[in-house]
Every structure is written in structure tokens, then in C-alpha cells.
Amino acid sequence: MRRDVNGVTKSRFEMFSNSDEAVINKKLPKELLLWIFSFLDVVTLCRCAQVSRAWNVLALDGRNWQGIDLFDFQRDIEGRVVENISKRCGGFLRKLSLRECLGVGDNALRTFAQNCRNIEVLNLNGCTKTTGATCTSLSKFCSKLRHLDLASCTSITNMSLKALSEGCPLLEQLNISWCDQVTKDGIQALVRGCGGLKALFLKGCTQLEDEALKYIGAHCPELVTLNLQTCLQITDEGLITIRRGCHKLQSLCASGCSNITDAILNALGQNFPWLR
């Protein structure tokens, strides 16, 4: 099947027949129409898809669905919606936010992972039906993943992080805030496979001890942002290892860490003058 220079198959645009009376369809090249559609949001694309057969082709072209944020529709999103999106977008999808989409679970996300293997940014913050099975699916199919938000996904465990470390080596940003089942063993497994981490959010991970920070300090030299808010067991000793190993650190949150002292804060200030 012949393709033009923009990779658009000729047969796909045969649907723009002479019977389509809209002036815009006659006057503008179909490639230009497709480019215009690429600026539309999800709701507008869906509405345009109902205008005519020609616009349906344009609106549902996978290239218009490289980045999707469904937060505004969180109460209406069920697993089948995510599955349908993944089948439509396939390899085009790079960014997807399902923040607080409470109806989305592991089965839908497995289908998503299988279909969208080029995903780079995935936000599952507040998707409380998500468990370690989703991490296994991402590990198996989504090796290009760079940013992952699992905050408040309280079923995430050490084994979940181990799976991510084995299949997502490019991971740069991970948020597991309030995943309170995670311990130092999970952090150890994670950083050994994802040494390129630049941002790590551990807020509310109350089981973490100083030893977890030792693993981070030893394996994450690129770390720029670290959030330890309400990690109650962290002491000066753990932050010393961060000071020694994470020389690029710019942002550190230790609010609620009642066991740290002024001494370590002074030391951090002296070693990281660029700390924000």
C-alpha cells in the first residue's frame, strides 16, 4: 500500500469522497487537516469524530493521541475506556494521565501496556485498584518508561519495585508516596536496576529506614530531587549517605522527619550550596 511523504496511506484518504460537501475538506490538503486536528483536546477530538466519515478518520488517527490526560473525566473512566484508547493509539501514545481514575485496575493496564509499548510518562496517582500486577505488566512491555507516578497506590510492594527495576531501566522519575508497604528491600531492588533516577518521591513511606537511603546514595548519582516527608525513621545517618553519594541533589524535603538534627542540615547546606 503506497504511502506519501508524511506516512499517510492513500487508501485511508479515499474516504474523503466528492460527496463530502464541507468546504474545508475540499480546500485544504488532508495532511494539513490532520495537523490542525493534532492541536485539539480529547473532548473536541471525540466530537469531531462524529461530524463525518472523513473527520472520523482524522480525529481518531493515532498521531493525535500521543498525550492524553483523563483527570477531568476521572469519575467516568472505566477499564474498558483505557483498553479502547490503547488499541486506538498503539505505539503512538507517549504520555497518559489516569490520575484518580478509581475505576481502572490491573487488567485494563495490562492491555494498555501490551498495546502502548512506547509509553514514556504514566500517571496512576490515586488509582487505588492498581497493584503489583500492573508493575509486572509495565516491566514486561514498557521498557521506554521514564516517569511513573504510583502515589497512593497502597498495594504496591517491594516485589512491585523489583519488577520495575528489571524491565524499566530508563526510569528517571518515580513517585511512590504513601505506598507504606515498601521497605528498604524494595528500594534496594529498585535502585540497582534504575540507577539513572533523577527524582524520587517517598513521602509517607513510613517503613523506610536509614539503610534505604544508603542504597539510594550508593546507586543514584544522578538524583536531583528527593522527598522524604513523614519518613519518621530517617535520621542524620541516612542523610549523611545521601550527602556523600548524590552530588547533584537540588531539592530535598524532610518535613516531618523528627529524628534529624540541625547538624545534618548545616552539613547539607555546606555541601549543596545549590540546594533549593
Image: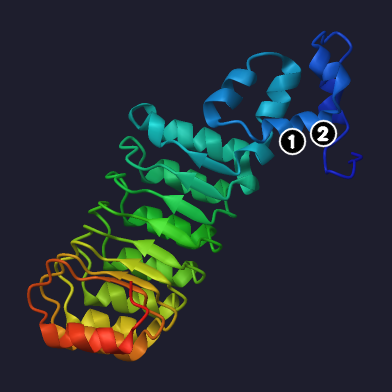
* Amino acid type, callout 1: Trp
In the image, what residue occupies the spot 89% across and 39% down? 1
Decide: marks 1, 2 in contact (CB < 8 A)? yes
Residue 3 image point, x, y percent: 89, 41
Q: Is residue 53 above or below residue 238?
A: above
The number of callouts visible is 2
Q: Residue furthest bottom?
A: 244
Residue located beneath label 2 in the image: 31
Q: What is the three-letter code of the residue carrying label 2?
A: Glu
Residue 190 visible in image: yes
Mark 2 Cα-neighbour bin, 10 Å: few <14, some 14–19, many ≥20: some
Q: Which residue is mark 1?
A: 35
The x and y percentages for residue 14 are 86, 23
Q: Quadrant of residue 132?
A: bottom left
Direction from residue 47 to residue 22 in the image, left or right: right
Q: Which residue is more in the foreground, 58 or 135? A: 58
Residue at 41% from the left image edge and 35% from the top image edge: 79
- Residue at x 27%, y 52% (from the top left corner): 153
x%, y% of residue 102?
Answer: 30, 37
